Amino acid sequence: DTGVSQDPRHKITKRGQNVTFRCDPISEHNRLYWYRQTLGQGPEFLTYFQNEAQLEKSRLLSDRFSAERPKGSFSTLEIQRTEQGDSAMYLCASSETGSNQPQHFGDGTRLSIL
Amino acid sequence: EDKVVQSPLSLVVHEGDTVTLNCSYEVTNFRSLLWYKQEKKAPTFLFMLTSSGIEKKSGRLSSILDKKELFSILNITATQTGDSAVYLCATYTQGGSEKLVFGKGMKLTVNP
């Protein structure tokens, strides 16, 4: 059983550049979630998918952020025109469908904006 | 706004000590509470609690929920250096949302 996989592990970029992260969920999981975590804080919810449908988005997800899950398997999170405040750990999680399912997290992508 | 508060935010103990981590919540239509352990990378799922008074146990770790007083505790007995981590508490709420609302986490350091 492979867990949730995220790529890249680290990304360093200049302010104003676009970045894209990938998440591969646990294979039998229909739900996929994106969170952002900054130092000393718990993860904050960004968005979630049920199969290919994006069902919920946080108001933290500004119009510079877009997430896709085109075939209901892997997902991408893109940030356009990055800003200093985007520096964070971006965590992906997946779960089975159904009420009260535990979410299983990947190791995250750490984004640093220069 | 939904809120999850953990206390203390950090704790330093010696190996062999017993620790109790607290998590209180103020959420709309509570559904369940989850505990995670985060070392340097991914939060790892520990427990999910949905009913009051029923203890969940795994080895030296145990947890219980009090839905009347709106809190949960996580106990770790006979702590080991490998228990050093950030422990996160999170809740699911009703109403069609599948997001987890997390507390800030509690950093536990176990010294040999």
Image (cartoon, rainbow, N blue to C red):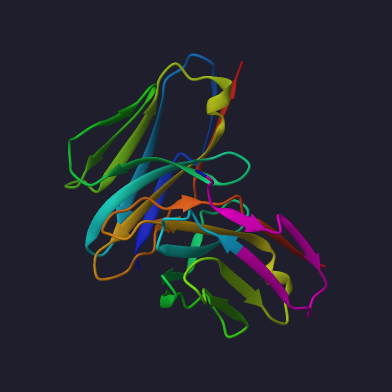
| Residue B96 image point, x, y percent | 27, 71
In the image, taking residue B64 as reference, residue A37 lies left or right, namely right
Q: Quadrant of residue A10?
A: bottom right
Pick the residue in front: A71 or A85. A71
Q: Residue at x 38, y 22 (%)?
A: B59
Pick the residue in front: B100 or B108. B100
As drawn, A95 above or below B85? below
Q: Residue at x 50, y 74 (%)?
A: A71
Residue A30 magenta-highlighted = no
The N terminus of chain B lies in quadrant: bottom left
As drawn, B38 above or below B98? above
The C terminus of chain B lies in quadrant: top right
In the image, taking residue B71 as reference, residue A45 lies left or right, namely right
As drawn, A111 above or below B41? below
Residue A19 magenta-highlighted = yes
Q: Quadrant of residue B74?
A: top left
Q: Start and end of the magenta stretch?
A: A2-22
| Residue A109 image point, x, y percent | 66, 58
| Residue A23 image point, x, y percent | 58, 62
Q: Residue at x 47, y 64 (%)?
A: A33
Q: Residue furthest bottom?
A: A63
| Residue A58 image point, x, y percent | 46, 75
In the image, taking residue A67 as reference, residue B17 lies left or right, namely left
Total numbered badges shown on the rendered structure: 0
Q: Quadrant of residue B7?
A: top left
